[in-house]
Amino acid sequence: NAGVTQTPKFQVLKTGQSMTLQCAQDMNHEYMSWYRQDPGMGLRLIHYSVGAGITDQGEVPNGYNVSRSTTEDFPLRLLSAAPSQTSVYFCASSYSYSHWNTEAFFGQGTRLTVV
Amino acid sequence: GQQVMQIPQYQHVQEGEDFTTYCNSSTTLSNIQWYKQRPGGHPVFLIQLVKSGEVKKQKRLTFQFGEAKKNSSLHITATQTTDVGTYFCAAALRGSTLGRLYFGRGTQLTVWP
């Protein structure tokens, strides 16, 4: 049981380049989400999905796209990287059947630097 | 704006001292969860509280959920160097999308020997 797998772990991009951060989970979780973590800012929600084919914006969606074609995968696309997107990115998944059990499982994170 | 406020942002303690972090919201919470993130690591789930006034303990850690379900606290008794990290609260808001969590900004705990 791998849990939540994120790739890559580290990435350096040049301004204007695009890339996709991969996230996969093997727990059959309906809910998946992407966060970015910056010093002093905690975890800010970028996009989330409540199931295959359904996505929605979080607090800081600009510059990012997502899709959810399967229950397992939830990739995050940076369209045209900017230095302000330098951050640590976490993918997370959880059950979403009730508020009695919504423990979030996080991936290991992707440390992205845009130069 | 920030839905869940967490204080303090930083706490430095000597080993053996107690530590407390607090979370507050102006909105009624469906549940509150606590996570720990070690330096360089990812957030790891510690516990979830759902009932009004609920108190749960895990060894030296005590978690409380307020009677009005708008605040929570995590208290560590006699800190150890292994407690170092950032502690986050995360809440599900009443009426929000199931699964969506609102995170506090975290309290970074440093413990010196």
Image (cartoon, coloured by chain):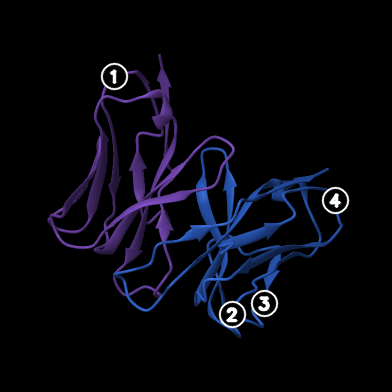
Q: Which residue sits furthest front?
A: A1
Disc 3 element: loop
- Circle nearer the viewer, 3 or 2: 2
Chain B colour as displayed: purple
**Distance of mark 1 from mark 3, alpha carbons?**
48 Å
Q: Give the numbered dot on residue B16.
A: 1
The image shows residue B14, relative to residue B107, as above or below, that is above
Q: Give the numbered dot on residue A71.
A: 2
The chain that hosts pointer 4 is: A
**Distance of mark 4 from mark 1, alpha carbons?**
47 Å
In the rendered structure, are the residues bearing label 3 and label 2 in contact, judged by CB atoms less than 8 Å apart? Answer: no
Q: Earlier in the sequence, mark 2 or mark 4?
A: 4
**Distance of mark 3 from mark 2, alpha carbons?**
11 Å
Whether labels 1 and 3 belong to a single chain: the reply is no
- Residue A20 location (% of width, % of height): 77, 64
Q: How many marks?
A: 4
In the rendered structure, are the residues bearing label 3 and label 4 in contact, judged by CB atoms less than 8 Å apart? Answer: no
- Residue identified by numbered label 4: A15
Q: Give the numbered dot on residue A67.
A: 3
- Circle nearer the viewer, 2 or 4: 2
**Distance of mark 2 from mark 4, alpha carbons?**
32 Å
**Residue kind at label 1, given as amino acid type:** Gly
Rendered blue, the chain in question is A
Give the residue drawn at x 50%, y 37%: B38
